Amino acid sequence: MKKFELFILLFFLMLSASYADVILVPLDYNDIQTAIDSCSDFDTVLVFEGAYFENINFHGKRICLASLYIADGDVGHILNTVIDGSQPLNEDTGSCILFISGEDSNSIIQGFTITNGTGTKWIDEHGHGVYIEGGGILISNSSPKILNNLIVYNEAIRTSSGIISSGAGGIRSGDGFPLIQNNAIIGNSGMYGGGIVLNYSGGIIRNNIIAKNRVFKPSSSHNTYGGGGIWIGNDNPTFPRLVENNVILGNSALGDGNLPPCGKGGGILIHSAYVEVRNNIIWGNTATYPAYDQIWTYSAGMTFFSYCDIQGGWTGTGNICADPIFCDSNYVLSLYSPCVDSGDPSSSEDPEDSLNPGHALYPSRGFLQNDIGTYGGQFTKTFPDITSYTYVEEESESNSGEPDVTRFLSPLYGKNEIGLHFFLPIESFIEINVYDITGALVRELGKGFFSSGDHELIWDRKDCRFHEVSSGVFFIILNDNETLSAQKLCLFK
């Protein structure tokens, strides 16, 4: 056992002797579910790094299920402690995590990668039929805390006889009040609510990255209902709804049909519900109906958008429409971003840098006024490197309704070298060049025939044949003589 792990073990053994029990996985039990089943309220199940192929049910337990992240704040534990729901004992219970027994805010899951869930066959609480829901996490009549997780590559798209539809690829909550905070919810799929669904549910969705989730139509006999990033529907007067300080980016809502939500709300869909939406970046989302790429509201009642950066603009106090200018693939803002210090001045301030009083602590930027986006406000946290997840392939809708793969993926930033990943569906003659913001050629990266498949080119910022590169905004252009694909880079010394 590594020295660090031994230290953590001894620390929690001392803690358990004084307070509640701490159950260690795999030291006390080989699997997470058995550890949970052995718990009493207010115990902690502490999970060491590894891959756990389980579909976990909290069974009403008021416990904290956590990785070693809670001990030392090392975000590497989040990447390396994986709950994989791909091997359910019953395909009708394919969610990675179930909160369906009245769990409250003392039921916590924190510090995991939650992936490969396929959703649970679920009877709607309000008599609307049977659905497959909650690819990653399914919540019903419960109010857990979901903190500091990567919720990636889950889906709820299965259909069969008697199923109305499938949705909520990442998280589904019905008639509850979850706190969903500091999570990266990326690359999840559903036929509605690719990232998150709140149905007759309250909830706080705060300081998350909600990116590259998708809604599409795998079955011609079942409808889609929009909401690529977030789907919120049907008021529950018991619970408020707050969507605050998130990046909601690159989500998609594809599909058509005779129902109003189909193919709408690439970023957020809200119908028949009151929601407060503030300090969010809602950008680069797409829908079948372009007028509703970013947002679609329908009978939304008293829904307010304020101090948000929304592509295409939106009515509301403090809203802006300006390129947010990220400086890395974790969506940290550039120092020159218009979102810095542009959030609601009455909301919580950014954490202060003790070494630079009056200035925000990284990854917040600027002074102390709340930044728009994931890293604004007092609840901001540092995320693990999510570069591999932000490479999720962009989508467009083909005649079959299935997503097609584009050829151009996000760059990987290094200190001096930029790795450019791209995909070609067929062998092609292409040119790839770097230009500055004035259109001047900076570097020729490649020219010639490239085979079909994935490729990577490296741009060394120190090797620029035309003029020196220090910092600023640049564009990488891929040209195959038929189509131009572009990727913006924000670089600093």
Image (spheres, rainbow, N blue to C red):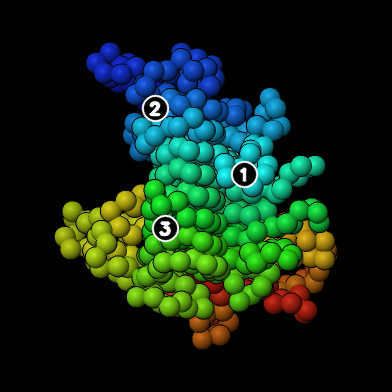
Q: For residue 41, which quarter of the picture? A: top left
Looking at numbered disc 1 in the image, what kind of residue is underneath it?
Gly
Q: Is residue 102 left or right of residue 428?
A: left
Q: Residues within 10 Å of mark 1 (few under 14, many from 20)?
A: few
Whichever of labels 2 and 3 marks the residue nearer the N terminus, that label is: 2
Instruction: Determine the secondary structure under disc 3.
Output: strand
Instruction: Quadrant for residue 87, please give it.
Output: top right
Residue 399 placement (x, y as % from top left): 82, 66
Q: Is residue 353 above or below residue 177?
A: below
Q: Earlier in the sequence, mark 3 or mark 1?
A: 1
Residue 113 appears in the figure: no
Amino acid residing under circle 3 = Val
Residue at the outermost front position = 127
Alpha carbon of mark 3 to alpha carbon of mark 1: how far? 27 Å
Q: Which mark is residue 243?
A: 3
At horizontal 65% and vertical 67% (from top left) the residue drawn is 260
Vertical order, 186 against 256 (above or below):
above
Q: Is residue 359 left or right of residue 273?
A: left
Horizontal relation, residue 386 to residue 458: left or right? left
Residue at 60 percent across and 53 percent down: it is 194
Instruction: Look at discs 3 and 1 and give the one toward the viewer.
Output: 1
Query: Which structural element holds mark 2?
Result: loop
- Where the N terminus falls, by quadrant? top left
- What is the CA distance from the residue labelled 2 to the residue labelled 3? 25 Å
The C terminus sits in image quarter: bottom left
Image disc number at residue 62 = 2
Picture mark count: 3
- Residue at 58 percent of width and 82 percent of height: 441
* Residue occupied by mark 1: 127
Front position in the image: 493 or 106? 106
- Give percent across and percent down for residue 13: 32, 16
- Disc 1 to disc 2: CB gap under 8 Å: no
